[in-house]
Amino acid sequence: MSELEKVFKKSYKCPICDSNFKNLTVKQGKARMVDTDIDLKVNYNDIEPLKYDIIMCPVCGYAALERYFDRVSVFQRKNIIDKICQSFNSVFEEKDEYTYDDAIIRYKFAFLTSQVKMSKNSEFGYLCLKMGWLYRSYAASLDEKEEAKKEELYKQELFYLDKALNYFINARANEQSPICGMDELTFDTLLASLCVKLNKTEDAKKFMNIILSNRNATKRIKEKVRDLKEILEENVEEGEN
Ligand SMILES: [Zn+2]
């Protein structure tokens, strides 16, 4: 089944300019999971759903992850109109599927929206995490011959994952659980995983200890921590050689 058959045009109403518009979104149950990366990124067969995670109004440029799309205060709305909509030139044509480059533009508009909204650290973190993962999938979709481009995308991936980690650490200190819809243990596991992925050994150990001392930690989560520890040790050994 092609990507084209797994997405459809869904209708939305913009909370900023009140326009009705359509965006592509993944049909429920059509993305089949293949496996999960160290940092909990889920991979799917024949489609990267992350490309379809941003809802963007083609009329005014307002963009956000679905979870945050309708959450706009009167004050934020006014700022978005002043700082985004008034200078936004709609250049978006209707598409049957989004390319990685389309998706990156959509994420950048969502990032801009979050800046103007003065969103919480968790919202920035979630955007950066998804952007980092998007760059990873983009690189994986390219041919071996495109090594220079892959290298550039990898740098972007690490840049955004590092930003995500910093935002999440701030969110953990200042926001109430659940953060981004994750309970405390899942969120701490994500942080530990990101630290391992980014080779931040001390921070990784700190979060692993927090997880292991949480009396609610399930067997499955403890196993995940054990896996992360192994990867971390391998990374340290490689670094020493
Ligand atoms: Zn709009």
Image: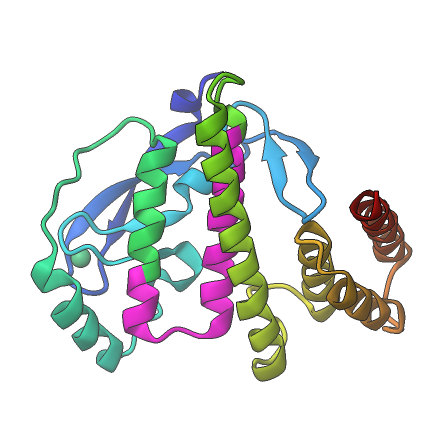
Q: Is residue 55 magenta?
A: no
Residue 41 x %, y %: 62, 44
Which residue is found at the position 71% from the left and 54% from the top?
199
Q: Along the line of sight, which residue is nearer the eye, 115 or 146? A: 146
Callout count: 0
The way the protein has been coloured in the rendering is rainbow
Q: Is residue 114 above or below residue 137?
A: below
Q: Is residue 79 above or below residue 200?
A: below
Q: Is residue 179 visible?
A: no
Give residue 60's quadrant in the image: bottom left
Predominant secondary structure, magenta span: helix
* Quarter holding ligand 1: bottom left
Residue 203 x %, y %: 74, 67
Left or right, 126 with respect to 35, comes to left
Q: Is residue 207 above or below residue 14?
A: below
Give residue 5's quadrant in the image: top left
Which residue is found at the position 23% from the left and 64% from the top?
15
Where does the magenta region start and end? 112-139
Which residue is found at the position 56% from the left and 58% from the top?
162
Q: Is residue 121 visible?
A: yes
The quarter of the image holding the C terminus is: top right
Q: Is residue 128 magenta?
A: yes
Which residue is found at the position 34% from the left and 32% from the top?
98
Q: Along the line of sight, which residue is nearer the eye, 62 or 12? A: 62
Residue 1 x %, y %: 49, 16
Of all residues, the one furthest to the front in this rendering is: 241
Residue 18 x %, y %: 15, 60
